[in-house]
Image: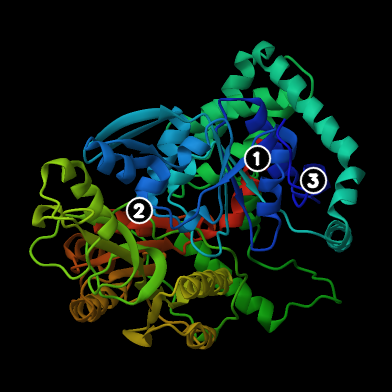
């Protein structure tokens, strides 16, 4: 075992992080588990835990910086050897040093997406293939990729998340755990060597446990019944492909071996689901939910006689408030009992003001795995990478220029010229560069977005105080957009008008204030709202060429104010949805309809618009863990 640096924190001394430790142990035991991701906020010991693996694995930690180039990571032309020999010579990249070691990437969500995809291909396949210029070579790379990320900054695409076999979430710490962290950190800073001796017995026990599990692993079996459970869980969470199924099997086998068993039991599958499924959830499919109360109870409540008892108790007389609530519930019941194909007019409730409901951590609802426009002049943001047209940004790669260039990629230019030095007239210069060797830099930078929230503020969202929930969800999305440096705007429609509450801005404080003061009531002029937002965003997109623009429509999709007098408002809206096309603007529909029965007007609207569709509750990224647990227990 290679000697471990004294400043590395012992693996067994890391407080909490049980899921993260379990994921790393599985990767060290089972060679089929090759990629591990730890997700959590800043300062939660993700990096400390990753580096601590060297103490229990005997492997060296090889760091992969975020600004690494293709040649540095995968390999490329060895310029010095090529200049001497006149033949293209291969220089292995950083992945060659990671062979039979552990490759560590911090803040992997900030890494260039194409480079990360290529990196994961090499790690999963165990082979690095280099096809670059005159170089064509390959070398082995038997390594474990351990990555960390802070989802509050920006998230990875569903495709890249799916390629991580295991993903552990950092849990919150209570007061006692925080005190323990502080005391251990102080002891380690005061005497690193003494602190390591204090936990040496635990570290040795961890090493023996992993070695024993490696020996047991080839003998571990899993029953057909548990394989069926794994398949059912993956289908319930909407995991695409079979990576989730395979990861759960491999993880469950590793967990059984770590516990000294040669057969997988149900508990192993339950623990594996926590590491393999949450990051694979498909946001187009809601997570499994705990069983709801039977509908018969609701029907029984509705079947009760509407007349009060003949002799109501004297100490509980019906109040005016109860009568008003009952009339509102009856009105809602009459509406809900209509068939979805012909929803009735929504109630024209009096104007109400609702407080902002619960906030939550929002999923990456804008991501659709599509490439950005190739060039943009928008200001920096954090949503995704786009090529810079003004010479600023990160040097990502090189290319042959189309005409003159002022941004020369000197490294790529020298590599292009190196193989031909033997046949060129040197004239006492070290290297001769000709015009065909010139390469220019391709620079990239983060591009932001403009998000216009088009909010249904009609009386239908006042029923059951749905508007409080809607406001909480919108504020959560506004805060998420602020972190990612997006511009946010707010439009609301109710009664017979659509109002621009907040033009696109980067100030979340204005958005909060306007959202808090947004009243609710009146009919639903969805058709006129679509017409107005069409005009507004068409003009906006023309003035902001190259910027990604989204309209986020928050509604239950049920209209009752037509554009043409006497027309069917809902049929009119569905027809508009087929025809509405705003250049360079994409639509997202958030279904604000809740309760039973649930109408599908908003879903049909999204389908005809070609928009991404979410139910309001699907935006909550933290809601999934409870769904997985309930699916296991059911």
In this rendering, is residue 140 above or below 88?
Answer: above
Q: Residue at x 81, y 43 (%)?
A: 12
Separation of marks 3 and 2 at Cα, in angstroms: 40 Å
- Residue located beneath label 3 in the image: 10
Quadrant, the N terminus: top right
- Crowdedness of circle 3 by 10 Å Cα count: few (<14), some, many (20+)? many
Quadrant, the C terminus: top right
In the image, residue 290 lies at what x, y percent? 65, 45
Separation of marks 1 and 3 at Cα, in angstroms: 25 Å
- Crowdedness of circle 1 by 10 Å Cα count: few (<14), some, many (20+)? some
Out of 277 and 406, give the one closest to the viewer. 406
Q: Which mark is residue 368?
A: 2
Would residue 594 be found to the left or right of residue 115 on screen? right
For label 1, the SS is: helix
Judged from this view, the residue extending furthest toward the top is: 219
Out of 515 and 423, give the one closest to the viewer. 423
- Residue located beneath label 1 in the image: 274
In the image, residue 152 lies at what x, y percent? 56, 64
Q: Earlier in the sequence, mark 1 or mark 2?
A: 1
């Amino acid at each position: 075992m290679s000697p471990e640096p004294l400043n590395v924190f012992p693996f067994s001394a890391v407080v909490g992080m049980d899921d993260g430790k379990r994921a790393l142990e599985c990767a060290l035991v089972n060679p089929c588990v090759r990629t591990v991701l730890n997700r959590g906020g800043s300062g939660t010991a993700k990096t400390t835990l990753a580096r601590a693996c060297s103490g229990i694995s005997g492997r060296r930690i090889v760091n992969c910086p975020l600004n690494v180039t293709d040649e540095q990571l995968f390999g490329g032309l060895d310029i010095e050897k090529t200049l001497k020999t006149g033949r293209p010579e291969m220089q292995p990249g950083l992945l060659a040093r990671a062979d039979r070691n552990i490759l560590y990437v911090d803040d992997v969500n900030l890494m260039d997406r194409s480079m990360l995809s290529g990196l994961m291909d090499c790690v999963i396949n165990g082979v690095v293939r280099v096809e670059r210029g005159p170089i064509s070579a390959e070398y082995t790379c038997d390594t474990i990729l351990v990555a960390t990320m802070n989802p509050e900054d920006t998230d990875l695409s569903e495709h890249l998340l799916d390629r991580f076999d295991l993903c552990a979430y950092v849990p919150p710490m209570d007061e006692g755990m925080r005190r323990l962290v502080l005391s251990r950190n102080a002891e380690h800073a005061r005497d690193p060597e003494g602190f390591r001796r204090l936990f040496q017995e635990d570290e040795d026990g961890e090493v023996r446990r992993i070695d024993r599990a490696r020996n047991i692993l080839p003998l571990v079996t899993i029953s057909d019944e548990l394989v069926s459970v794994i398949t059912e869980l993956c289908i319930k969470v909407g995991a695409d492909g079979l990576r989730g199924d395979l990861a759960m099997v491999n993880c469950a086998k590793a967990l059984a071996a770590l516990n000294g068993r040669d057969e997988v039991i149900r508990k192993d599958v339950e623990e594996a689901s926590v590491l393999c499924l949450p990051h694979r959830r498909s946001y187009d499919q809601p997570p499994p939910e705990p069983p709801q109360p039977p509908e018969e109870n609701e029907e029984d409540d509705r079947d009760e006689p509407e007349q009060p008892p003949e002799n109501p108790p004297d100490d509980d007389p019906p109040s005016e408030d109860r009568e008003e609530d009952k009339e509102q519930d009856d009105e809602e019941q009459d509406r809900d009992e209509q068939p979805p194909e012909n929803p009735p007019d929504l109630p024209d409730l009096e104007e109400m003001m609702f407080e902002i409901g619960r906030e939550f951590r929002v999923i990456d609802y804008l991501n659709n795995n599509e490439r950005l426009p190739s060039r943009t002049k928008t200001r920096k943001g954090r949503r995704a990478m786009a090529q810079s047209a003004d010479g600023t940004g990160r040097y990502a790669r090189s290319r042959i220029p189309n005409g003159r260039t002022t941004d020369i990629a000197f490294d790529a230019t020298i590599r292009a010229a190196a193989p031909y030095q033997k046949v060129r007239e040197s004239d006492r210069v070290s290297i001769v560069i000709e015009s065909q060797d010139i390469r220019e830099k391709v620079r990239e930078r983060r591009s932001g977005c403009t998000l216009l929230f088009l909010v249904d503020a009609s009386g239908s969202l006042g029923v059951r105080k749905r508007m409080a929930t809607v406001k909480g969800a919108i504020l959560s999305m506004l805060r998420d957009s602020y972190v990612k440096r997006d511009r946010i705007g707010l439009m609301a429609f109710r009664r017979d008008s659509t109002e621009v509450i907040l033009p696109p801005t980067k100030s979340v404080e204005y958005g909060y204030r306007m959202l808090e003061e947004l009243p609710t009531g009146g009919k639903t002029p969805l058709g006129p709202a679509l017409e107005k937002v069409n005009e507004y965003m068409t003009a906006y997109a023309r003035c902001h060429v190259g910027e990604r623009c989204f309209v986020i429509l928050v509604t239950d999709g049920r209209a009752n104010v037509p554009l043409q007098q006497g027309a069917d408002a809902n049929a009119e809206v569905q027809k508009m949805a087929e025809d509405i096309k705003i250049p360079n603007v994409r639509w997202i529909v958030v279904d604000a309809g809740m309760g039973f029965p649930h109408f599908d007007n908003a879903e049909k609207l999204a389908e005809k618009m070609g928009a991404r569709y979410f139910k309001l509750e699907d935006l909550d990224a933290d809601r999934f863990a409870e769904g997985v647990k309930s699916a296991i227990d059911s």
